[in-house]
Image (spheres, rainbow, N blue to C red):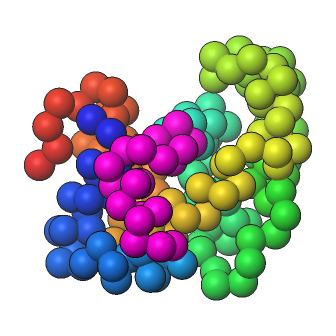
Amino acid sequence: MKLGDVLKKERERKGLSSMDVASSLGLSLEDYMEMEAGLSPLEEWGPKLSRIAVRLKTPTSRLINEDGVYTEVEQARHQCGKLIKRRRERIGLAQEELARRLDLPLPELISIENGESLLETYAPILLHFAEIVNQPIFNLSFPCGLPLDKINDYP
């Protein structure tokens, strides 16, 4: 199962049109439809963000915005990376250890923490979508409490 499948099902469950959701997210209909089709970088970055949240033992939304909610105000530059780094340091975890626990190359984690990854683009979109469909952001990557790659059918 793809994250895009979950987005589509949750949108449909709320009775929202693709155009309405795209507009609310500030995306073109084409860009939003790529997300639902599972053809955007969101497929990589949504689940990766959720895995980071699990390893850091913090709500996923708090790694996107300090107060855990989407705001219309432009996302602060490198905010996700800063929040991830701050949380990692707060719990006393070295970069090398977190990278190992996430099965990521250390340079990739460093790039994430420096705000140089696509997480900065896609995490706020995912948080905003979660609020539109009234779901915790974590549930989008772990519907039914299982990771997307373990789910064959999503009701």
Q: Which contiguous range is marked in magenta? A: 27-45
Residue lying at the far front in this picture: please name it: 30
Of the 4 image quadrants, the one containing the N terminus is top left
Q: Which of these two is toward me, 143 or 117?
A: 117
| Res 69 seen here | yes
**Image quadrant where residue 13 sits:** bottom left
Residue 152 placement (x, y as % from top left): 17, 30
Q: Is residue 94 magenta?
A: no
The image shows a total of numbered marks equal to: 0
Question: Which residue sits at x=26%, y=68%?
Answer: 11
Residue 34 placement (x, y as % from top left): 40, 54
Q: Is residue 143 left or right of residue 126?
A: left
Q: Main SS of the magenta segment?
A: helix
Q: Is residue 43 magenta?
A: yes
| Res 93 seen here | no
Question: Which residue sits at x=47%, y=73%?
Answer: 28
Q: Is residue 9 left or right of residue 78?
A: left
Residue 140 placement (x, y as % from top left): 38, 51
Residue 39 placement (x, y as % from top left): 42, 44
